[in-house]
Amino acid sequence: HARRLEGVDENIWVELVSLAEQYKTVNLGQGFPNFSPPSYMREAFSKAVTDEHTLLNQYTRAFGHPPLVKALAQLFGPLFGQDLNPLTNVMVSVGAYGALFSTFQALVDEGDEVIIIEPFFDSYEPMTLMAGGRCVYVSLRPVSEQKPADGGKPLDSGGWRLDLAELEAKINKNTKMLVLNTPNNPLGKVFNKEELEEIANICVKYDLLCISDEVYEWLVYDGNQHVRIASLPGMWERTITIGSAGKTFSATGWKVGWAFGPDCLLKHLRTVHQNSVYHCATGAQEAVAQGFQTELARLGKPECYFVQLRDELQKKRDRLYRCLTEVGMKPVMSQGSYFMIADISVFKSEVPPPTDQNIPYDNYFAKWMMKHKQLAAIPMSAFYSGPHKKQFENYLRFCFVKEDATLEAAEKILQKWS
Ligand code: PMP
Ligand code: GLN
């Protein structure tokens, strides 16, 4: 095998998805909705492939189906404060995964260092390594003085903060890029404007590139605001922003994702893309284009899908929070995304830690829970680098983008348990 594959052969999704199936679990593990995308979009997809007189079963433009890049540029231009050219500032790929992979391959060189904020969506690490880069980690940590000593509001995911001095100390002449994910998977933290300004200032000061993974951009709760770091001063020129139709329209199986950025960076992503996947399914891109055209006209209105999905998910999150609390777990209220983490330390007497000290407790517990309680969740240590896994081994990540019947089944399991 090629040397670039060394150390990237294990994948948490491949492993846990198959275990979740094997134990016939109620699945709050892998992040995908178990309900359908909007019906008008499913009809558009279906029409795209069934019409007699259509070219939508054939190749389209390599870097994005023209109606889709046009709709993306139109919707996101004002959000970035940029006049976006659909042909040069937007590239569509096979899911956010495809857009991320092109970005790492295009911009990270042998020996470059990439700063990754923990906890992180696991793929950033292998993607950095496969590009020949080195990962440098800096962890978000719960800020202790925000803990409810007086029985006040419990710490939410916004209370997990980045230590800027620690971040700055990790930058050297080899540092090429910083990877940001807001709303964050798995924590559900939504970085606020001040935090993003501080990160942006560091990127500008040290001339770093930034990958901002914003696939959960519409799923921000309790009136929190999603701020795009590329819209801050000095950032557009150095940032690639990643998005996903899977998350935007509850269609993770369609695998349509994209990257926004300045042409001087995107042209290198296009080089990777044209020589690897070339383009992604035309019918899916057509349906997503129609999705954006329709939602653009409804933006900010109550019937807009982005608003409806967000409001639905906030209710599901609150329900999950309640039932996790009832069983004795300590959930950390999520500000955004599909996910919420919960502290499982209370179970250490019922489910004693494994004798092998190298196995993180949450990993062991998640497998125990699948097998004995038929409930699947993801160990939070999966979102940390090797040496840091043990420090954050007391949490599970629960996914709440599920039908109410699924959440009810999970609730029943938890109630019976407590
Ligand atoms: N980034 C984050 C933060 C994710 O959680 C995921 C997983 N859904 C992706 C990227 C990949 O998205 P896609 O399914 O569009 O490839
Ligand atoms: N992004 C999703 C999650 O975090 C799933 C990723 C995957 O299955 N490869 O659960």
Image (cartoon, rainbow, N blue to C red):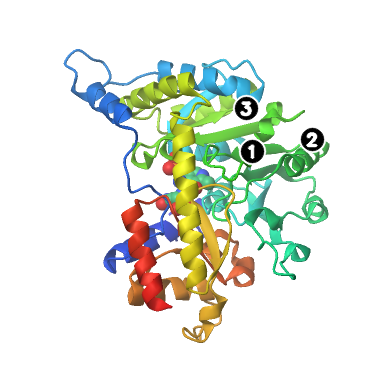
| Residue at x 73% of width, y 45% of height | 175
Instruction: Give the mark nearest the N terminus, 1 or 3.
Output: 1
Read off the residue under disc 2.
204
x and y percentages locating residue 340 in the rendered image:
53, 57
Read off the residue under disc 3.
265
At numbered mark 3, what does the secondary structure look like: helix, strand or loop? Answer: helix
Query: In front: 15, or 228?
Result: 228
Residue type, numbered disc 3: Leu
| Residue at x 57% of width, y 54% of height | 334
| Residue at x 79% of width, y 45% of height | 173
Read off the residue under disc 1.
225
x and y percentages locating residue 145 in the rendered image:
78, 64
Residue type, numbered disc 2: Val
Image quarter where the N terminus lies is: bottom left
| Residue at x 63% of width, y 56% of height | 157
Image quarter where the C terminus lies is: bottom left
Instruction: Give the mark nearest the N terminus, 1 or 2.
Output: 2
